[in-house]
């Protein structure tokens, strides 16, 4: 009788971590004109006028507002581009990124 040992058909399945998402955060300041903030939000984050105005106003009133959530490199690229758009006009407009919990 052949020694037929039955092997359990189990394959180690490496658990892939879901890549972390990063928030892009708009920071209020006293100098950047409201209309300019709205223009940058529309151009860089493809927001409509109403949504951009809401986000701008929330940052204006509360100090910060989450703009959107992306994979890390996209969040950082967008935050840098949007911040640079302000700097090009001499404004202290600031977008930062922060990992989601
Ligand atoms: N506080 C600015 C003003 O009164 C407008 C502003 C809003 C600037 C949001 C930055 O993230 C900001 N002109």
Image: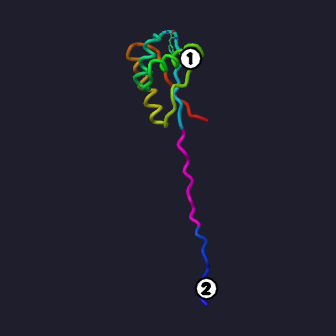
The kind of secondary structure element at disc 2 is loop
Do labels 1 and 2 touch, CB within 8 Å?
A: no
| Label number found at residue 58 | 1
| Position above or below: 71 against 84 | below
Task: Name the quarter where the C terminus is drawn.
Answer: top right
Please tell me how crowded label 1 is: few (under 14), some (14-19), or many (20+) other residues with Cα within 10 Å.
some
Q: How many numbered discs, if any?
A: 2
The kind of secondary structure element at disc 1 is helix
| Position above or below: 34 against 5 | above
- Is residue 87 or residue 6 the one in the foreground? 6
| Position above or below: 22 against 31 | below
- Is residue 49 or residue 90 the one in the foreground? 49
**Label 1 lies in ligand 1 vicinity (Cβ under 8 Å):** no
Say which residue appears at 56% left-offset and 64% top-offset.
Answer: 11
Q: Position of residue 29 (x, y in %)?
A: 52, 13
Say which residue appears at 52% left-offset and 9% top-offset.
Answer: 30
Q: Position of residue 90 (x, y in %)?
A: 41, 13
Image position of 98 (left or right of 34): right
Q: Quadrant of residue 82?
A: top left
What stretch of residues is rendered in magenta?
Answer: 10-20
Q: Main secondary structure of the magenta part?
A: loop
Q: Position of residue 31 (x, y in %)?
A: 48, 9
Say which residue appears at 58% left-offset and 16% top-offset.
Answer: 63
| Label number found at residue 3 | 2
């Amino acid at each position: 009788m052949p020694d037929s040992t039955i092997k359990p058909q189990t394959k180690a399945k490496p658990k892939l971590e879901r890549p972390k998402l990063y928030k892009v955060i708009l920071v209020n300041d006293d100098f950047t004109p409201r209309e300019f903030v709205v223009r940058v939000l529309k151009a860089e984050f493809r927001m409509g006028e109403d949504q951009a105005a809401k986000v701008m106003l929330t940052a204006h009133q509360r100090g910060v507002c989450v703009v959107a959530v992306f994979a890390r490199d996209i969040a950082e690229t967008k935050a840098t581009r949007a911040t640079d758009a302000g700097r090009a006009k001499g404004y202290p407009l600031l977008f930062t990124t922060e990992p989601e919990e």
